[in-house]
Every structure is written in structure tokens, then in C-alpha cells.
Amino acid sequence: MIKMKNFRILVRNIRDGFKNVVRNFSLSFASISCITVTLVLVAVAIVGSLNVENFTKIIRDDFTIVTYIKSGSDEDKISKIKTDIEKLNNIESITFDSKTDIAERMKQESEVFNNIMSSWSASENPLYDTYLVKVKDSEKISKTAEQIKKIDGVEMVKYGEGMIDSLISIFKIIEKILIVIVISLIVVTAFLIINTIKITIFSRQEEIEIKRLVGASNFSIKQPFVIEGLLIGLIGSIIPILVTIYGYVALYDKTGGKIFSQFIRLIKPFPFVFEVSGVLVVIGIIVGMIGSSSAVRKYLKI
């Protein structure tokens, strides 16, 4: 019986929450508009932050240490260098790239190179045999490169250290800024909703006083406002969700999933846009509920 009674109260409060949104539509519209505008900005910041994180991951995953083998090294020496590299802790894979193969690729890529290199004999080829080394942890790539450089028979190592490190540092800074923006926008939204709903509550003090006089509990008085906040947050997230889905898909199609270069690739739209949309719904609902609850508790002293 108690459970049925609580259920009926919940159903009635949900109904009252819907009625209150409609009855006080002008004030509800202000709260909904506030959430909508802010969630659009939050969506942009989330999409940007996650894509920047993806850019960083792609660059790290594509890190390759090009290990140049000293000229004149025989097959035994080349094989030993590979064995020594494999003994290191941070090695994921090693691929051998002979100077003959490198020369052939260069000839195919440029007519000028083809004219010059076609006259070379095997002994005249000045290029280096190389090992292309991928690491498990890109954070330790500098240390791994130094270890490889010390191996007997290695001429030098290259992995674009200066440019890549700078690029990743820039991406990290951008990512942190976007995260701060997201958090700030959510806090500002909550603050604005608290103040907007406070006006609504003050306009309905008589209604609340009547509920108190008939013996309504604090919880039953507050619950419709919380549900109202939930509905406001849910409605306010609809437009940001549509903007996120259609806007991101259009951006991805227009750019072909790449921005500026092959390294800077966008996350594929699906299921990414649905995941972001889910986050927006949750943020909208939570902010709306917290805003309503805080306004009732703080300003009406329930």
C-alpha cells in the first residue's frame, strides 16, 4: 500500500511538473533558452576537445623511429642490430627498409630522381638501409631513440622530435583550455537556471504555502520543481543534439574527415555524435534538476 501511495504521488508530481512547464511557459522558455544556448557551446567544446585528443593519439600512434644503419654493414651486422633493438622494452614492431627499395620508391615518385638514380649501381647507392621502429609508449620515444642510437652499427636515428613534440604540446594546451571552457559553461548554466527558476518559485509562493498548510512534506513540495527542472533540461538539449548530429556530419563530409593534413583526422561521425548527444542530455537534465532543487532549497528555505 505504501509503495502504491508513493507511486501515485510520483505520478502526480510528474504530471504537475509538466503542467508547471506549460503554465509558466514564459519563464520556462527563458530557462530552456539558457540551457539550449549553453549546451550548443558545450557541444562545440566537447567535440573540439575529443577531436584534439584524437589528433594527439593519431600522431603518437604514427610515431616511427627511423634507424639508419652504417654503410658497409653486412647481413649479419644488420640482423644483430635488429636483435639488439628487439631487446629494448618499448619496442612494438620493427620493419626493415633496404636502400634499394628506398631508391625504387624515390624513382617512382619523381622523374628527376628517376633520371639520376637509374644510373646507380648497387655499390654506388649512397642511401642507408633502415629499420622503421614503432614504440609501445610514445611518451618514452626520446629515451628509446637514444638507446637505439647507442647500438653498434647504427649511424643515426630520426623521429621528427622537435616538430612532433611541439605539436603535441600545442594540442595538449588546446585540449585543457576546451575542458576548462566546458566546465565553466556548465557552472554558468547552473547559476543562470537557479536564478531563472528562483523567479518562477517566487511567483508561486502562494501555491507552496497552500501545500504547506494542508500538511505536504518538504519532499512532496520540492519534487515537482525538480521534475520541472528535469523537463526543462531535457527540452533544452533537443536543439543542441540536432546541431551536434547534423552539424558534425556535415563538417565531416565537407572536409573528408581531414583538416589540413593526414595527421589531423576527425573522429568518424557514428557512433561519436550519438555519444556526445547522450552526454548533452545528461548534462541538461542534471543541470536542470540541480538548478531547480537549489533554487527551492536556498530561496524558499524548504
Image (spheres, rainbow, N blue to C red):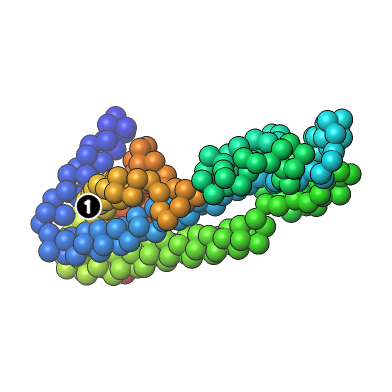
As shown in the figure, which amino acid type bears the numbered disc 1?
A: Ile
Camera-side residue: 204 or 279?
A: 279
Depth check: 92 or 177 in front? 92
Q: Quadrant of the C terminus?
A: bottom left
Q: Which residue is mark 1?
A: 239
- Which residue is rendered at x = 65% and y = 35% of the image? 101
Q: Is 6 displayed left or right of 46 in the figure?
A: left
Q: Return the x and y of residue 33 as percentages of the image width and height.
A: 21, 62
Q: Please tell me which residue is depicted at 86% across the width and 43% down the height of the picture.
A: 153
Which sits in the foreground, 160 or 4?
160
Is residue 181 rendered to the left or right of residue 118? Answer: left
Q: Label 1 neighbourhood size at 10 Å, few (<14), some (14-19), many (20+)?
A: some
Q: Is residue 20 left or right of residue 289?
A: left
Q: Is residue 222 visible?
A: no
Say which element carries label 1: helix
Residue 281 relative to residue 211: left or right = right
Instruction: Give residue 182's quadrant in the image.
Output: bottom left
Give the percent coordinates (x, y) of residue 163.
61, 61
In which quadrant of the rendered view does residue 12 lie? top left
Residue 273 visible at all:
yes
Residue 59 image point, x, y percent = 56, 49
